Amino acid sequence: MMTTPEHTTASGTRRRPQRRRSALGTAWSVLVTVVAVVTIGLTIAAYTGLLGVRAITSSSMQPTLNAGDMIISRTVPAAEAQIGDIATLQHPDGHVVTHRVLANEPDPEGPEGTGRLITMQGDDNDVADPRPYPATEVDVMLIRVPYLGGVFRAVSQPPVSYIALGSLALLLASGFMPARRRSTEAQERPTS
């Protein structure tokens, strides 16, 4: 059986050498690394158009989606949007709407073969949206992440995003730096 060596300090007390990194410190580093990788991956996917990341700002989709939730979606041809899907479309007046698809029909005035008229309704609304949305592409929700919409909105604003990414990079880099150790000689030196 191996025993851990003990050291005697200047005061005569015995102590065992501390582990280089505590389990809590390791868990923290792993968590920060995972969050950083996921955040960077989502950011790249959003900027390249592979995924859409949006914050929910209203209560029209409750109880399915709450204000402050974040959704991750993918863009598909409008003809692929299924009844019952939660989709995000741009309203003709410019604002973005995330509601449930009620109907998906060809648009006689839209682009040949790709134009669709999509009827939508919020889960918390009593009636469908006033007019169908003309669309050639639709963002269909893949995943809901509760409570992170506000964080996403704050972090996605340019000044905050630069500070957040810089802080995240520093935090990530600090996890790979060797732990500072105090000199054993300084600890064991008698004080007069």
Image (cartoon, helix red, strand yellow):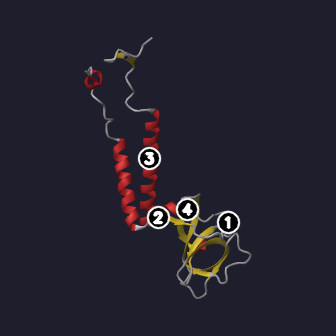
In 3D space, how far apart are the residues under numbered discs 4 and 2 (Cα atoms)? 12 Å
In 3D space, how far apart are the residues under numbered discs 2 and 1 (Cα atoms)? 22 Å
Give the amino acid at mark 1. Answer: Gln
Q: Is residue 43 left or right of residue 70?
A: left
Nearest-to-viewer mark from 2 and 1: 2
Residue sitting nearer the eye, 53 or 75: 53
Q: Could you tell me which residue is drawn at 54 percent across and 62 percent down?
A: 149
Question: What residue is disc 1 on?
Answer: 62
Q: Can you tell which mark lies on residue 32?
A: 3
Give the amino acid at mark 2. Answer: Ala
Q: Is residue 139 left or right of residue 85?
A: left
Nearest to N terminus: mark 3 or mark 4: 3
Looking at the image, is 139 positioned above or below residue 187?
Answer: below
Nearest to N terminus: mark 4 or mark 2: 4
Location of residue 12 in the rendering, given as x and y in whole percent from the top left corner: 35, 14
Q: Is residue 166 left or right of residue 73?
A: left
Residue situated furthest top in the rendering: 1
Looking at the image, is 178 positioned above or below residue 99?
Answer: above
Q: Are marks 3 and 1 in contact (CB under 8 Å)?
A: no
In 3D space, how far apart are the residues under numbered discs 3 and 2 (Cα atoms)? 19 Å
In 3D space, how far apart are the residues under numbered discs 3 and 4 (Cα atoms)? 20 Å
In 3D space, how far apart are the residues under numbered discs 4 and 1 (Cα atoms)? 13 Å
